[in-house]
Image (cartoon, rainbow, N blue to C red):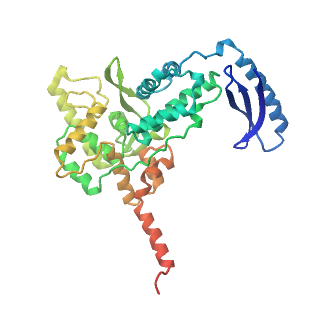
């Protein structure tokens, strides 16, 4: 097989471009980074590295153990899914599994080999998804899984380039969440005084918690002496053996999600009342009381931890029951309501990022920038004071 190599630069890094034809005479190309910056006197070293990469590539392409000419793209996807199962969260795996199954349903009767997968075939799949009226954000999830799977194949030398890198990446649509105003939140609170989800809704609204975070709260998270609450646990729901099960994790979504926040007096009173109710329920139920979740805050009258899906469904029932008074929002929108209220009261975006536990400032800014009315009003006032449109 005739293989040539040339040296190019990309993002100020020397790259080796390998050009060759496969056994069917199709022209192929593979880019390999040398890791050497074009700044400085690295040209000679980059040329040496190019010869090493070329030699290694010639050896690998001739190795019979790496030939995958007869492996279908769908077969590889299923193998890849199994290979990552123990490296990702259970609920992430569930999501990947659904996506991979739908990808395989589309490609199954096309019998496309892994080595023969072309960018246009991936692009056609995205067009198919759009025809099903899926959003750009949903199609982007499919793209990310396909690209990640093929990137693994590239690293393992199963393919020579990643065709997903040469398709038009689905555009992420801007998310604008619904949220309640101060008066709307207070109205909601009047309707849930005797609701089983009362403590869940109060804590979510005040601290802007994710559903997994509020359900994962343990009594040990509250330091009543120092008046702090530490978000460090989560509860998620996944499927095992065709059954929905709750997974309890002693970690948060990411490092930034682990955070300590002030415990105010009103919340302390609510927690004390909630603890008193739990103790009464435990006495009433006796041996029937579930003792598995004694460390957790958000439990029902029988001591069972609230299921994530139950929280979502029950909150929807609250909305429907009071639809004449309450504007319909999702449970997750209580988190957005917390953020919008903080913005309305002049809290800086950076502090809101820390309060919500976002990993980056840009995440907070992208979601809530359209709510910064005070900042925009200040800008408008400055311009109106310096510009004259009428005599």
Q: Position of residue 322 (x, y in %)?
A: 17, 47
Residue that extends furthest to the bottom in the rendered view of this protein: 391
- Residue 181 appears in the picture as rendered: yes
Q: Position of residue 124 (x, y in %)?
A: 49, 34
Q: How many marks?
A: 0
Left or right: 98, with 82 as reference point: left
Residue 17 in which image quadrant: top right
Q: Residue at x 31, y 32 (%)?
A: 308
| Residue positioned 64% across, 15% down in the render | 67
Of the pair 67 and 219, the residue shown nearer to us: 67
Q: Is residue 199 above or below residue 24?
A: below
- Judge whether 46 appears above or below 39 on screen: above
Q: Seen in the image, is 100 located left or right of residue 313?
A: right
Q: Identify the residue at image location x=44%, y=65%.
A: 376
- Quadrant in the picture for residue 63: top right
Instruction: Tell me the quarter of the image containing the N terminus.
Output: top right
Q: Is residue 263 visible?
A: no
| Image spot of residue 55 (x, y percent) | 78, 22
Q: Using the image as rendered, state which of residue 332 and residue 389 is in the foreground.
A: 389
Identify the residue shown where x is 79% and y is 25%. 52
* Percent x, y of residue 73: 53, 22
Position of 15 with respect to 371 (left or right) is: right
Looking at the image, the residue that sits furthest to the left is: 284
Residue 200 or 237: which is nearer the viewer? 237
Query: Seen from this angle, which residue lies furthest front?
Result: 25
């Amino acid at each position: 097989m005739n293989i040539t190599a040339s040296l190019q630069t990309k993002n100020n890094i020397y790259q080796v471009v390998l050009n060759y034809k496969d056994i069917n005479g199709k022209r192929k190309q593979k880019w390999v980074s040398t890791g050497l910056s074009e700044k400085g006197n690295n040209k000679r070293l980059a040329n040496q590295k190019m010869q090493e990469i070329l030699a290694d590539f010639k050896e690998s392409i001739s190795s019979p153990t790496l030939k995958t000419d007869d492996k279908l793209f769908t077969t590889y996807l299923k193998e890849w899914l199994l290979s990552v199962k123990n490296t990702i969260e259970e609920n992430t795996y569930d999501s990947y599994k659904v996506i991979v199954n739908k990808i395989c349903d589309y490609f199954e009767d096309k019998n496309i080999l892994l080595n023969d997968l072309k960018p246009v075939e991936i692009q056609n799949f995205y067009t198919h998804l759009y025809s099903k009226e899926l959003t750009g954000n949903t199609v982007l999830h499919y793209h990310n899984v396909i690209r990640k799977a093929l990137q693994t194949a590239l690293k393992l030398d199963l393919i020579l380039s990643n065709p997903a890198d040469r398709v038009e990446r689905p555009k992420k649509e801007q998310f604008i969440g619904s949220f309640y105003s101060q008066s709307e939140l207070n109205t909601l609170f009047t309707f849930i005084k005797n609701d089983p989800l009362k403590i869940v809704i109060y804590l979510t609204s005040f601290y802007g918690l994710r559903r997994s975070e509020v359900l994962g709260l343990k009594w040990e998270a509250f330091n009543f002496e120092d008046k702090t609450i530490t978000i460090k646990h989560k509860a998620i729901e996944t499927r095992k053996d065709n059954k929905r099960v709750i997974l309890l994790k002693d970690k948060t979504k990411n490092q930034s999600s682990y955070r300590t926040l002030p415990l105010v007096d009103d919340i302390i009173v609510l927690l004390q009342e909630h603890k008193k109710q739990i103790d009464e329920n435990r006495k009433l139920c006796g041996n029937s009381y579930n003792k598995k979740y004694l460390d957790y805050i958000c439990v029902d009258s029988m001591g069972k931890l609230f299921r994530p899906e139950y929280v979502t469904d029950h909150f929807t029932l609250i909305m429907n029951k009071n639809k004449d008074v309450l504007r319909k929002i999702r449970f997750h929108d209580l988190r957005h309501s917390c953020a919008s209220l903080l913005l309305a009261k002049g809290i800086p975006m950076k502090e809101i990022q820390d309060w919500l536990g976002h990993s980056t400032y840009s995440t907070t800014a992208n979601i809530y920038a359209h709510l910064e009315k005070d900042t925009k009003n200040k800008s408008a006032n400055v311009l109106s004071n310096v510009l004259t449109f009428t005599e």
